[in-house]
Amino acid sequence: MATTSREFYKNVVGKSNSFYFLERDVMGYKCEIYNYKNSTYEDFKNNDAFEMRGLTFVYDGMYWKKYFALNKFFNINETSTCEYSELKNQEIMYVQEKLDGSMISFIKFPNGIVRAKSKTSF
């Protein structure tokens, strides 16, 4: 990725209907949460937007601090890069159970308080 500034992500939102951002006020701090809706693999690839899954910026009064969630991942046979025929001869490094539900991450605010965050809310 050439840049990972807020302007980069805002530009992605501005040029693609597949991505959006929400503005929130949390404990008096400005927050921006970037996410996707009905996006295809090509939307993510063409916009270099794999980070835009719950990506959060928090403004401390001088600077915007970026907090990553998880990069977008795709299930087997969901995209051309994840086709079983392409993966079947790869060495398995580890196996992890995939549980459905809300993705939780944690954000440390400038005042030192840590808040749990789902994909789009605190």
Image: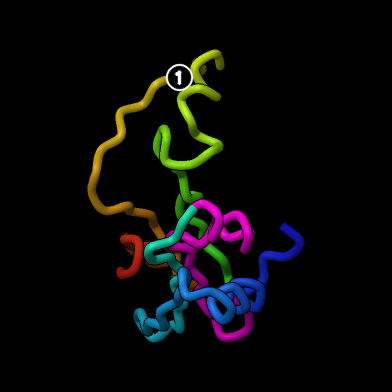
- Where is 84 relative to 30, above or below? above
State the residue position of label 1.
Answer: 94
Neighbours of disc 1 within 10 Å: few (<14), some (14-19), many (20+)? few
Q: Amino acid at mark 1?
A: Tyr
Q: Is residue 54 magenta?
A: yes
Check disc 1 and report its element: helix, strand or loop: loop
Q: Is residue 4 left or right of residue 73?
A: right
Between 17 and 92, the one lying in front of the other is 17
- Colour pattern: rainbow
- Where is 87 relative to 99, above or below? above
- x and y percentages locating residue 121 in the rendered image: 31, 70
Q: Residue at x 43, y 66 (%)?
A: 35
- x and y percentages locating residue 52 in the rendered image: 51, 62
- Where is 35 relative to 102, above or below? below
- x and y percentages locating residue 68 in the rendered image: 51, 57
Residue numbers of the magenta segment: 41-64
Between 58 and 48, the one lying in front of the other is 48
